[in-house]
Image (cartoon, helix red, strand yellow):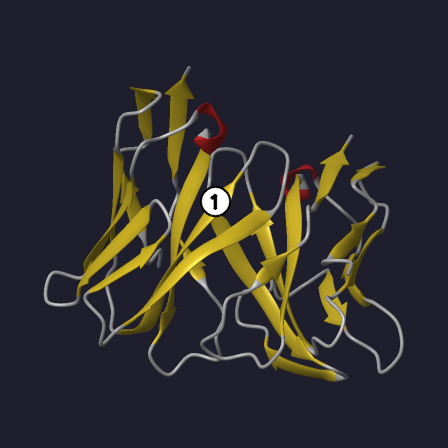
Amino acid sequence: NAGVMQNPRHLVRRRGQEARLRCSPMKGHSHVYWYRQLPEEGLKFMVYLQKENIIDESGMPKERFSAEFPKEGPSILRIQQVVRGDSAAYFCASSSTGGTQPQHFGDGTRLSIL
Amino acid sequence: SQQGEEDPQALSIQEGENATMNCSYKTSINNLQWYRQNSGRGLVHLILIRSNEREKHSGRLRVTLDTSKKSSSLLITASRAADTASYFCATDAAGSQGNLIFGKGTKLSVKP
């Protein structure tokens, strides 16, 4: 009974490269949330997706960041032309119904930009 | 704008003592949740309290919610070294799609 799976756990990129972060939600969950956490900070909401649809992307930077959750396969958070300020831990969470429900988190991807 | 704010930022206690963490928020909410995060790991959901509830218990955890003061507290009784972690409150604002707004957390250290 796997929980939320994120990979890779650690990702190192040079400035200007692309970073792709993957998230497989818990079995039976169709709602996925992405959050970003800076050191010693709480999590900041980025985007909420439900199979093939972006429900709320109010926390996503307007440029370079995109997210998808295709019908088949994991959700992907893509960061193009990465900059040093993108260094953070990125967490994915899933829930069965969305709305007012507890969210189940993965262990995150720690992105480091050289 | 950041919703939840926890205090204290850090708390150090001895095993067996109780730990109390507080959280304040700014806008109307549907519910308030508490999560725990061990170093280098994801968040684990502890307890959810709805806006029409005032107190909730789960094992050694007790959560209170005061919507008039827009505040909540998490009490961990008879703490153990394994309770060492960061604790975050999270709210979903009334009318939101369910995305959570987290505070900066309280870092709890329980010494054996």
Using the image, determine if residue A7 lies above or below residue B68: above
Q: Is residue B100 left or right of residue A4?
A: left
Question: Which of the image's four quarters has the C terminus of chain B?
Answer: top left
Question: Which of the image's four quarters has the N terminus of chain B?
Answer: bottom left
Q: Position of residue B55 (x, y in %)?
A: 22, 62
Q: Position of residue A15 (x, y in %)?
A: 80, 39
Using the image, determine if residue A29 lies above or below residue B65: below
Q: Nearer the viewer, residue A38 or A107?
A: A107
Can you identify the residue that label 1 sits on?
Answer: B36
Q: Position of residue B101 (x, y in %)?
A: 42, 60
How many marks the image carries: the answer is 1
- Image point (79%, 41%), residue name: A9
Label 1 residue SS: strand
Q: Amino acid at mark 1?
A: Arg
Q: Position of residue B44 (x, y in %)?
A: 54, 50
Quadrant in the picture for residue B63: bottom left
Q: Is residue A39 left or right of residue A21?
A: left
- Image point (71%, 39%), residue name: A110
